[in-house]
Image (spheres, rainbow, N blue to C red):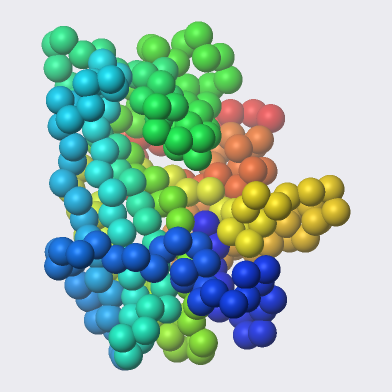
Amino acid sequence: MQKLEQHGQTIAKAALPRIEQYDLHTQPRRKPNWKASQDELTGQAWINRFLKLADDPETAHCGFVGRNVFFSVDYKKNCIAAGKLTIWRAIHDRDISFGLDTFVERSDCSSQDEYNTAYAVAQLWGGRDEETWWLEQTPFCYGDLCIFERLVIDAKSASRSHATWTIINGLLQRICRRSVAAIVLKAFPLEYEGSTSNENSSALERRRRALVRLYQSRLGFEPVSDPPLAHEGWMLKLINEHAEPERREP
C-alpha cells in the first residue's frame, strides 16, 4: 500500500496519471452501494457480495469465501484516491473443516500476493510451525478477516488529504460494523513494487517506516506483535479483541 501526495514526486511512469499507474482507475460499471462526502470530496465504494463455495468447486474444500471492495475518492469528478480490500469469511459446516492451513491453500489458488498475505496471517496467528496451522482457526472463529490490499492517494493539498483519510476511515467503519474481526495490511510503497534491489534498500526502508507511522496516525493500525512480520511492514487493526494474536518474542 502507498500514499502519494507529495508535490513534485518523481515516478518511473510519469506519463500516466498516478491512479492509473497502479491499476486502480477502472471503476465497476454498476452503481456504488456506499457513498460519503467530506468538504469538496466524494467517496464511493462498490462492496461485492460474498461468493459461495459452489462458485469455485476447486477451492470449496478449503472452507473460505471472499468478497472484494473497491473504492475511490473524487475531487470535482477527478479521481484523487482509490483502493481495494478483500474480506475473507470461513464457512462453518459439518462437512468442511477450515484452519489457517486451508486459508493458505485457498489463497495459493488465487495469486502470489494473496498467498504471501495468507502466509503472513498464518504466521501471525498460528506461529512459525506450519505443522500446527490446521489446529488454529483464529481470527476466523471470531469474524471475517479484511485485507487492505492497495491504496493510492494523490491529494494536492493538506485539506484534501485530511478529507480523503476521513472518507477512508468512514468506509472502514462501514465494512467493520458487521462481523469483521480484524483488518490486516502491509505498509509497502508501491513505487518499489517489482523493483527492489540492494541499491535502493535503504530508501525503501525509510519509505516503509514512514508509511507505518502514517497508517498509525491516519487509520489506527499498529505493527503486528510478531517482530519479523512487523519489520516487513505488516500491520493490524483489531476490531474484535478476542481475535488478538498471541504476542511472540523475537
Question: In the image, is residue 129 above or below residue 227?
Answer: above
Q: Is residue 242 left or right of residue 202?
A: left
- Decide if residue 188 is on the left or right side of residue 145: right
The residue shown at (60%, 48%) is 233
From the viewer's side, name the closer residue of 101 and 166.
101
Specify whether residue 214 is in view: yes
Q: Position of residue 144 (x, y in %)?
A: 27, 38
What is the x, y in percent for residue 217?
51, 66
Residue displayed at 39% across by 12% down: 134
What x and y, as percent, mark residue 82? Answer: 39, 67
Quarter-of-image position of residue 44: bottom left
Q: Quadrant of the C terminus?
A: top right
Q: Is residue 177 above or below residue 241?
A: below
Is 232 or 177 nearer to us in this picture?
232
Quadrant in which residue 208 is drawn? bottom right
In the image, what residue occupies the spot 38% across and 78% down? 79
Q: Is residue 54 left or right of residue 129?
A: left
